Amino acid sequence: MSIRIGIMGYGNLGRGVEYAIQQNPDMELAAVFTRRNPKDLKVLTGTAKVFPAEEAEKMKDEIDVMILCGGSATDLPEQSPKYAEMFNIIDSFDTHAGISQHFDEVDSAARKSGKLGIISVGWDPGMFSLNRLYANAILPNGKDDTFWGKGVSQGHSDAIRRIEGVKDAIQYTIPVESAISAVRSGEMPTLSAREKHTRECFVVAEEGADKAKIESEIKNMPNYFADYDTTVHFITEEELKKNYSGIPHGGFVIRCGKTGRKEEHTHIIEYNLKLDSNPEFTASVIVAYARAAYRLHHEGQSGCKTVFDIPPAYLSPKTGAELRKTLL
Amino acid sequence: MSIRIGIMGYGNLGRGVEYAIQQNPDMELAAVFTRRNPKDLKVLTGTAKVFPAEEAEKMKDEIDVMILCGGSATDLPEQSPKYAEMFNIIDSFDTHAGISQHFDEVDSAARKSGKLGIISVGWDPGMFSLNRLYANAILPNGKDDTFWGKGVSQGHSDAIRRIEGVKDAIQYTIPVESAISAVRSGEMPTLSAREKHTRECFVVAEEGADKAKIESEIKNMPNYFADYDTTVHFITEEELKKNYSGIPHGGFVIRCGKTGRKEEHTHIIEYNLKLDSNPEFTASVIVAYARAAYRLHHEGQSGCKTVFDIPPAYLSPKTGAELRKTLL
């Protein structure tokens, strides 16, 4: 019998989850839940039902894992604990500073219901976190750096879009080559935010808007841009659609560490992602962890987990013996 | 109380384990076991005892995890099941084709004793295997390639040393740059052994030996060299000691996969190691898994495991809450 998946929220991430399920024969998409009118929503999977979000509970017994595809700012803090009362859930909560609280809230809901939740699944948090953990445990005497990009940051793009006079915008985070080289060489440099990444913005201004003012507002925006070297390009709406419509991303986690009698040996561990589609890759990670959630719950486990708690074998459809034979 | 480690076999790997323990404050080296005369063996750790290998059993209650540092050809097939009857063990068994049988033998011994064994720990098998597993689970529709080097292959060096007329030798495995580029570009090429790696040999010949014959024997040796483009350099013993005494290694696991409605998006996952000392890095991985073995056994688990079965959090001395706060 296949693992029955529910998708809550059918945006870029939700559609990515649907594509990923199609690549995994042990899974099926049972239902999609939406805050829009279900009649307006066309999903790809012929056998999947579409329901209003508020009717999720009635599918309690027909869904093995509910994948929450909302945003971290307002959706997931509310949805994850709520749906952990009815379902095994996976989310991609990515506000690093809020993870501890989010974990506790999902844990408490899932312990009560006997369900299992895995939070903050994706690539950062997610695969990058895992690689930071493995590399730290292996090389305790060392230093790691995470670089992001080149890729589109949705958060930074949204921040620009909120500026008066901006019609549309997209922001690329670009890692600084010389910083990457220094880290890869084993020098263990201490790098500021500005030294690690630059930010490039493509902005469509409203007609008659004050471009100099927009540019200054972007460059001086605290947290988002003020600490970085930022370039702003004004382009037309057509150029934006034509040349900047993809959602690529990626990055590196590099840890350098020392071993030996006098710590005379240097080792570099690097994990590197180049992604044509950020939401589709995130969705692919999530779907693998949905398999793990299903199995762990089947074995009687409940409560909140993160990628740190999941034995890697649980992500694969292969048996332990097959894995040892083919991948070890 | 710290985790008390035993080392069985004090060669390059055993010494690497001792160095790694010194970097991990929650561990201590309790004892070293050797087939040599214990009096001839000087270990670095003042508080560690040295015993003949055959007296291991009497330290049963004073060692939490025994790390087996012997070779995969003859030592570990015998030692791992034997010591799993008395201790939690870790080994670095690396004969890929023999892993299934080795697993079963250690599993059966460890189930009887109630102890826990983790086999095939290191970087390949080990961290590379983990990265193959994660990348396969995330991108089921794709292809992965593993490259090794540039680095010293002990097995190939030993094979050359067994040739008549060879006094000493060292062999470097070198990945072919154009093959790496093709894989990184997402082309998913089908590559033969010859297209992926070349082999470079530095050989010290005995006085008066037939160098042409040695070179031909190396280049035509089945399995080891016949399927590769191999270069042989004859050098003096002094040159070998001066320029080729290190044991560096490394390599890459690269998986390319497709996602999307029409699988129009390409993703590249790469895991990359550059190691100054192969045995010391292997030892560092082993010591992190010794921590996991200790904890899992403490929780009541027994039998044989591999890196695939171990939740990543068990490798770190940090608590779950600390990990979520600092690394997720």
Image (spheres, coloured by chain):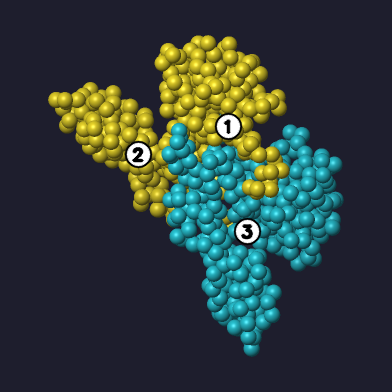
Chain colours: A yellow, B cyan
**Label 1 to label 2, Cα distance in Å?**
27 Å
Q: Indicate whether A310 appears above or below B35.
A: above
For the residues bearing labels 2 and 3, Cβ distance under 8 angstroms:
no
What amino acid does circle 2 point to? Thr
Tell me the element at label 3: helix
Are labels 1 and 2 assigned to the same chain?
yes
Is residue B314 shown above or below A2?
A: below
Quadrant housing residue B202: bottom right
Q: What's the residue at 54%, 22% (across, down)?
A: A47
Expressed as whole percent of the image width and height from the top left, the position of residue A242 reads 28, 36
Residue at the location (61% across, 17% down)? A62
Q: Note whether A300 is above or below A235 in the view shown.
A: above
In the rendered image, the residue lying farthest to the left is A208
SS class of the residue under badge 2?
A: strand
Name the front one of labels 1 and 2: 1
Image coordinates for residue A58, horizontal then vertical, percent: 58, 11
Asked whether A211 or A23 is in front, the reply is A23
Residue at point 35%, 47% (across, down): A176
Q: Secondary structure at mark 1?
A: helix
Q: Amino acid at mark 1?
A: Tyr
Residue type marked 3: Pro
Query: Does residue B186 appear to the left or right of A21 in the view shown?
Result: left
Task: Where is residue A150? Give x, y as percent.
Answer: 37, 42
Q: Residue A317: x and y, percent?
A: 64, 36
Cα distance in 3D space between marks 2 and 3: 38 Å
For discs 2 and 3, the disc positioned in front in the rendered view: 2
Q: Which residue is mark 1?
A: A289
Residue bearing mark 3: B279
Q: Which residue is mark 2?
A: A173
